[in-house]
Amino acid sequence: MNASITQAPLWLREEGAAWLFVTRTVLGILVALGIAFRFDLSSPGSAAVTVSIIALPQAGLVLEKSFYRLLGTLLGAFVTLLLLSGLVQHRDLFIVAVAAWIGICTAAAAWFRGFQAYGWLLCGYTTCLIGFPAFGDATHAFAIAVDRVTIVSVGILSAGLVNAVILPTRSADTLVQVVRRSFTDFVAFLDAATAPGGAARLANTQQQFSRDLAGLETLRAASLFEDPASRVRNSRLSAFIGCFMYASSRLQVLHRQLDALEKEGQAAVLAALQPTLVRFRALVRVAAQVPGSAREAAPIAGQLQELLDHWGDRQAEWESAFDPADARGRAVVLSTGVLLREAVDCARLLASVYAQLHSPRGSERGVPRFRPGVTSDALLAVIGGLRAAVVLIVMCAFWIATAWPEGFSATLLAAVGCALFASVPNPTFAARQMCGGFLFAVPALLICYTWVLPAANGFGMLCLGLSPFLAVGAWLMTRPGMTLSGSGYFLMFLTGLDLGSPMRYDFISMCNNALGLLVGIGFATLCLGILAPADPDWRRQRALRLLLRSLRLAATGSLQHLQPRFESRVRDLTLQAMVQRPANAAAEDDEALGSIILDIGDALIRWRTAIAATALDTRATTAFIDATVVAVERRDALSLEALMRELEVLQTTAVMEFAGAADDTALGAAVTARLAAFSTLRTAFRDLGGVLHAA
Amino acid sequence: MPREVDLSGVYVPSLLVAFVLALPVFWLLDGMLARAGVYRWVWHIDLFRLCLFVVMFGSLGLYWYR
């Protein structure tokens, strides 16, 4: 059956997946409604809204989002009860307290990523959702909080049930495919990176890797929630992701060095290294083909280990190509060899981790634990939080001043909108998209409310009547770029319908309610544009500045696992800058800047490690590194040129040291490591100068 | 057995208590089965796990309400 699915044409597979999603979402909503009606819960519509909000294409994603939704709701309910117990007699103070809490939660939502951010968001607006109705009715505050938690749980349970059991699309299956494809891509990348030339294409592949890695992280976290087998495999999987990132960067550094050697006309060095490079490529491509599954990749690690075991022979081979008096040539070939050795070692590690993935159990001995870190911008988070708090207070003031009966829906929606869009790359665009969904839901709401619902007698007929309207929303969610419109449609449609048993038909109050919702979301959209507008270009510049500043980590951080930490930060910031970039601008600059910063940081760390290994005087090194960090941060082309000249002097001194340390292998190794750092730095400085000139 | 449990003044249906109690037991068993590789022989893993949970919750509830 699987074979027939994968052989189907692309459009059929995509449409099939979309319609499976529509079926699951509609079914989930109906099940939630059924349960809520059956148990006579207070607002069945909210259970349906929950299902529609956590509707995502894969079971693991649904379960993860529901987990954080539940957590957020519970914490939010708890905080609301605390606030109510203290401030139930002071209306204005209560509003300020709620606004402060929502501000904190929105800031947290902007700080965290993915579904954790969503959990914080929910934590904030649950306070609104429970607190305002309970404020006028303090004796029932606890009952209202319990109602809310119950209704959310019902929605979560039915969504989880339908998504996991009925026609599931599992994250774990996608994960296996993505991991396999990543390894295949890696082998192709390795092929290209171990020869000079083609730098632009490789940089593109690197950025593709960064995106893939972010996607892999998401999938890994999601499959944790769906599958106990994934939980067993989890630590190996995160090791794979970390090793993948690390290994591809090592290859990138090696490649840029090979490229620079070719440009400098060091053909002799390249020729000396060539046999080893060819061997490396051949070992990774088992039997001249890319290994498909983890099992096939198993021998690679062993063979690479063998290559590493005889590394001394390789070094002797390279050196023999040079005249013993030619210290410079030998130094260059050996320092490039340092980079090559690291690349081979990382490839070996990656292959061994990959090979272990297929077994249910595996030893994790010798596998480094990398944690892909994310870097958040504190300023953006604070702005988002302040904006949400101000919007809530303004909306509440308007509500009190006008005694508007629908003030509650408007306030709620304004709070939700501000919090929801604070963390997305382009808030104004997202908010407009959601507003589009809201407006699109209005005619559907009117039709359903006036003709369909009154004709539905009994739950079966209600299901039949609602299905087409729900299907439209779910279908909207499957269209690329219209997901938020779909969510807006559901939110408006299901909240506006205000399903209950017995159903109360009051066309006027329905219209008023709908109007309140529209005003709320409209006000949030307006505030996102007016109050400290989150201009994408400004945010991009901020991400780039943080990117340049991340060199400080490489220059001063503790050397323990510094390289992976630094790398994940640089990759994350580069991605952030690229996401924010205006549609018509070229992406190459950000990409180039990201990889240059990666190189500089890499060289600084290597240099620091080499110095730390020998008991040398570190003052001159520290001064040079600090000057580098400052020059890069200021984008100062002049001081970069001065640093370049200084670097050449350092290089010449190191070569002389190398010539002097002919017999002392330990000292020789330290000097070659330093030399490798110098040459990487020089290449990076030259490229950075080019980027600065272009900008 | 009482149908409702008094948790410091809040009356909670004892089925809810059974549900909450069944969860850790299920997680333990689930993890053990996954480690043993049992799930590789199961056709529809999630359905199997759901049924497993229903069995545990049901037996706990029946024990309570019998």
Image (cartoon, helix red, strand yellow):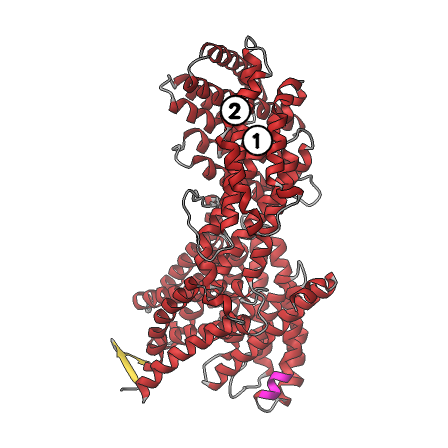
Residue picked out by circle 1: A253
Work out whether residue A114 can be spotted: yes
Task: Residue type at mark 2: give it.
Answer: Asp
| Vertical arrangement, residue A578 with respect to residue A227, above or below | above
Q: Residue at x 42, y 78 (%)?
A: B54
Residue most toward the bottom?
A: A457
Q: Which residue is drawn at 45% across and 21% down?
A: A669
Q: What residue span does the magenta drawing correspond to?
A: A460-464
| Vertical arrangement, residue A650 with respect to residue A275, above or below | above
To which chain does the residue with label 2 belong?
A
- Foreground: A272 or A500? A272
Instruction: Give the number of the disc on residue A313.
Output: 2
Q: Which residue is drawn at 52% across and 15% down?
A: A651
Residue most toward the left?
A: B8
Give the Cα distance between marks 2 and 1. 23 Å
Give the prevailing secondary structure in the magenta stretch: helix
Secondary structure state at the residue bearing disc 2: helix
To which chain does the residue with label 1 belong?
A
Q: How crowded is mark 1: few (under 14 residues within 10 Å), some or many (20 or more)?
A: many
